[in-house]
Image (cartoon, coloured by chain):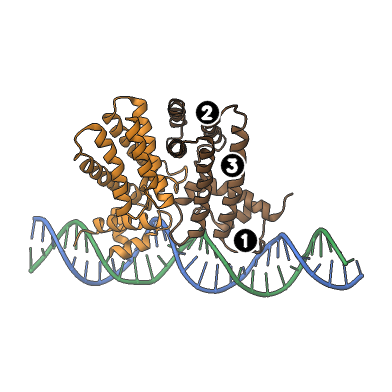
Chain colours: A orange, B brown, C blue, D green
DNA sequence: CAACATACAAACAAGTCTGTCTGTTTTTTT
DNA sequence: AAAAAAACAGACAGACTTGTTTGTATGTTG
């Protein structure tokens, strides 16, 4: 069995995804992770601290999956298109829960600037990802906005319809 | 002074916007609206019920403002572009709090289907708005996705940069 | 003036929340 | 095997949550 710290992060990921950040309590996390409360506070100094650790892990996981998925493509255009296929795959795998980062963005207050910065940093890396694939800066931003819109809309309508439309659009503009 | 019901909805709008739905308690709403708790539950059967009433009011307010704002434009292209200007205006007026509907989308669970439906209905009306302005259905969807992406990204980066980029993009594709 | 509707205050129930603390047990290292 | 580190259970504080209830006061309408 894995370490308490890993079990906490594992369960937090599942519960934050399913119920949202504010609706998930420490007690539920430790109970489902089979960890004592004292142990929790030995590894994380607060719930917000856990949130940041979760987002960092999620960032690593999500990006490595994206790069793994898109690297199968031969040319740049296909790579961009496969990024949208990646959304579809993740939607189906994670039951249209949307983006962890954008979900938490909607839940935090102005006081939680440290969390906001992690979210901004994640999305910045995504913009860089598209900027490296597309030389034209405006076009790269264009694709980024379509990408973000696709994630949100598939969560909202619990469907890949908008993602598929985006694929058709990207096909025509690149 | 307005009626208790109106005062509740007024304060709920402010607080939901500032702190989010789950982080705002009934007690705070009634205290700042100067309404007794018994009176609250005479007008709303639950907090979720208040949420739906709030979203319905917000829908009316937001759409009427959008139509008022865009109706100043002469032709269709200008109307579409002014919709993006409307985002900028709202961002500045409401301090980059983003879309009430998308914010609440991230906070609700699978059990709150009645709230989800109100959110979907709002966004559906927005899609219809663009569909009426643009005959080409894929282009209308394209603009809708850019619009949604613009709202989210301005909230995330607390900036109108992406909205302005969207305006340049829409200029070139319509 | 009487009757009714509405709003009030404030206590209460039953549960949640984060975070702290004490003391015991298990595991690892020397 | 002894010492140190880590994890355990679980009580506790103190404040929060939604929703109910009781009884009182105010205001409007017949």
In this rendering, does residue A104 appear at all?
no
Q: Which residue is mark 1?
A: B44
Element at label 3: helix
Residues at marks 2 and 3 on the same chain: yes
Element at label 2: helix
Residue found 24% across the figure and 59% down from its top: A4
Marks 2 and 3, how far apart in space?
A: 19 Å
Residues at marks 3 and 1 on the same chain: yes
Chain letter for mark 1: B
Chain letter for mark 2: B
Chain letter for mark 3: B
Circle 2 residues within 10 Å: few <14, some 14–19, many ≥20: some
Note whether B132 is above or below B114 in the view shown.
above
The quarter holding residue A56 reads top left
Which residue is at the front of the view, B123 or B87? B123
Marks 3 and 1, how far apart in space?
A: 24 Å
**Callout in the foreground (2, 3):** 2
Element at label 1: loop
Q: Which residue is mark 2?
A: B77
Residue A57 pos. (x, y %)? 27, 47
Residue D22 pos. (x, y %)? 68, 75
In this rendering, does residue A18 appear at all?
yes
Which residue is at the front of the view, A117 or B48? B48
Circle 3 residues within 10 Å: few <14, some 14–19, many ≥20: some
In the displayed structure image, the side of residue B84 where residue A43 appears, left or right? left
Q: Which residue is mark 3?
A: B63
Return the disc, 1 or 2, that comes first in the chain's sequence.
1
User: Which disc is residue A55 wearing?
Assistant: none
């Amino acid at each position: 069995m894995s370490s308490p710290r890993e079990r906490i992060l594992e369960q937090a990921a599942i519960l934050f995804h399913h119920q949202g950040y504010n609706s998930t309590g420490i007690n539920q996390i430790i109970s489902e992770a089979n960890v004592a409360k004292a142990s929790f506070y030995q590894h994380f100094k607060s719930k917000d601290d856990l949130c940041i650790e979760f987002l960092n892990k999620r960032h690593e996981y999500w990006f490595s999956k994206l790069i793994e998925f898109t690297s199968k493509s031969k040319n740049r255009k296909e790579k961009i298109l496969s990024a949208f296929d990646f959304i579809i795959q993740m939607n189906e795998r994670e039951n249209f829960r949307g983006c962890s980062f954008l979900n938490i963005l909607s839940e935090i207050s102005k006081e939680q600037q440290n969390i906001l910065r992690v979210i901004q940093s994640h999305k910045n890396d995504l913009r860089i990802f598209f900027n490296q694939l597309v030389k034209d800066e405006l076009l790269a931003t264009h694709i980024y906005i379509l990408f973000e819109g696709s994630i949100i809309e598939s969560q909202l309508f619990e469907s890949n319809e908008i993602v598929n439309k985006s694929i058709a659009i990207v096909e025509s503009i690149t």
